Image: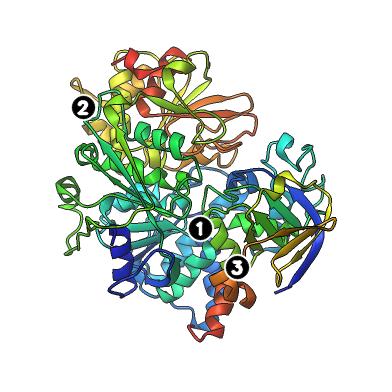
Amino acid sequence: MTITEKILARSARKSKLSPGENVWLNVDILMTHDVCGPPTINIWKKEFGNKAKIWDKKKLVILPDHYIFTSNKEANRNVKFLQEFARQEELPFFYDITQQTYKGVCHVALAEEGFNIPGTVIFGTDSHTCTSGAFGLFSTGVGNTDAAFILGTGKIWERVPESIKIIYDGTLPKYLTGKDLILWLLKDITTEGANYKALEFTGSAISQLSMDERMTLTNMAIETGAINGIIAVDDITKEYLKDKVKVEYEEFKSDPDSKYFKTIKYDITKMLPIVAKPHSPDNCEVAHRLKNIKITKAYIGSCTGGKLSDFVSAAKILYGNKIKVPLFAIPATTRIEKELESTFYKMKPIKEILIEAGCTIARPSCAACLGGPEDTTGRAIDGDVVISTTNRNFPGRMGSKKSEVYLASPYTAAASAINGFITDPRDFL
Amino acid sequence: MEKIIEGKIFVLGNNIDTDQIIPAEYLVFSLTDEKESAMYGKYCLSSVPLSQSGLPEGNIPFIKKDEIKSEFNIIIAGSNFGCGSSREHAPFALNKAGVKVIIAESFARIFYRNSIDGGFLIPIECKEKIYTKCITGSIAKVDLEKYQLNINDKIYELNPLGDVLPIIEAGGLFEYARKSNMI
């Protein structure tokens, strides 16, 4: 069996299962946020009525992160709804925005707070819940009805997916990041190439990647249509988890004779920095062929591209340079926000490098990755051409329907902000 | 579950993502409040580029100005319908706009689940590229017993609903679970 099949079998309390089978899973963590939390809770209340009882409060994690720093009254109402619910239910894992406990972007916070326990099954009301799969676990997104069902029962049905094995071999060149690796895959298999499949990432390049970079890969698994992305536990995973996860966990690995729907192999030393053009993450072209594209804005942030390693990469390019177009830097979490001050490149804190280059740093949240209310920092307006480290560039995704979004690595985004047009970061490295 | 669904078709292409179905800025509206939830119908499919809206000609708004329901209750589309975010607001919005059934070459997983488990609409797959062969505004009949689509007496075969049929017949995941004494 593959790693995904083994983890699903454990969750379904079965010794064996195969792709195509529908199984009922026992969920280890349910995660929700301010956009889908309130409707999920409303469905749970309506459907269970007087019997509504959270199946296990220790397994529910609520991380408001989407529309936080806004004057939009409906958005604020959603956050208040969650505060009230958490108070009534005395939830142990509610990360309130008015408290010191505020974290920021849910998928990154799940990792930081030690909820990503290898071998477990995580469901979240967000399609990028697949990010957690970087920790050798099964994680995927669901809608409100499914989440409400989990909230009351701890169970959900799922069809066991076939797996696609993606092998990245070679040493990562200094001008590439996890973002380039996943965009190359998208270029090749398209936004539907892995529909309902598990994406299993492996190869010598993976074993050299930090957890931040691995999370960029599993994060964008959903962009290929995959149900989950997964990377088996190794020493780098264990080192990351050392001071975060105190419980024993199971490490699963695919059997050598596992069956795959398909295997795709890359020599990453041959890859070049790549950019996804409007309006789809699979509409890719190498960066150096897009020099004629003038940009109006750059954006570094989100669950995909707002991790510490993303800002360190950007800082390497921005060091000693000034940006020509506004660059919005939005750390995914409050922890990363602090780490920007305590992490150095050439003896200078990352935060200082960003500020000296002219970047606007805003408080942690999903911010303009998905547009958001009118007053969202960095939101795309009519005529904007944005280069962004986020995950989607569908029409209107970052705000205005009359804007264009190019997806790229933090290296490419930073280099482009300096020049004012799309730039291959090799020009700076 | 209605076995025969008749109405006007609205034709779309490939990769209709959830941002096109319901842009994220509208997700702040309540799904339970009657007046607010009507906004989901009003803005349904509002981010589809106009040239792609109502194929083959395009330039047909799914929702007429100042209305909250669509004149089209059957959608015919290409592959990967509903890709992108997990927002259940997407099938909810289509339901609010009056859509009963979507016939597509393929669906993205979360959208497919949400449509069925929430009891919002019936997502049904087809083998051929029907969306390239029909015209927005045509009258169609979907037969869910024979799994056939009839447009102007031309019959297209549809894929059976398979394992998820009992959930659709029950009207959603909760109704299904109650019927089978799970909850």
| Residue A354 rendering spot, x and y as whole percentages | 34, 23
Residue contact between numbered discs 2 and 1, judged by CB atoms under 8 Å: no
Return the chain for callout 3: B
* Residue under pointer 3: B161
Q: Is residue A118 rendered to the left or right of residue A242?
A: right
Residue drawn at the location 84% of the way across and 51% of the way down: B138
Say which quarter of the image contains residue A365: top left
Q: CA distance from mark 2 to mark 1?
A: 38 Å
Q: Nearer the viewer, mark 2 or mark 3?
A: 3
Q: Give the crowd class for mark 3: few <14, some 14-19, many >=20 residues within 10 Å.
A: some
Q: Secondary structure at mark 2?
A: strand
Instruction: Indicate the chain on which mark 1 is placed.
Output: A
What type is the residue that disc 1 sits on? Lys
Q: Is residue A366 above or below residue A150?
A: above
Q: Residue at x 60, y 67 (%)?
A: B161
SS at mark 1 in the image: helix
The residue singled out by tag 2 in the image is A344
Going by the numbered disc 2, the residue's amino acid type is Phe
Number of residue marks: 3
Q: Secondary structure at mark 3?
A: loop
Place of residue A236 in the rendered image (x, y in percent of width and height, measured from the top left): 17, 45
Q: Label 1 vs label 3: CA separation? A: 40 Å
User: Are circles 1 and 3 on residues that touch, CB within 8 Å?
Assistant: no
Image quadrant where one finds the C terminus of chain A = top left
Q: Which picture quadrant has residue A121?
A: bottom left
Residue at 72 percent of width and 53 percent of height: B75
Q: Nearer the viewer, residue A351 or A220?
A: A220
Identify the subunit bearing mark 2.
A
Instruction: Give a yes or no on whether discs 1 and 3 share a subunit.
Output: no
The residue to which callout 1 is attached is A80
Mark 2 closeness class: few <14, some 14–19, many ≥20 residues within 10 Å: some
Query: Which of these two is toward me, B110 or A108?
Result: B110
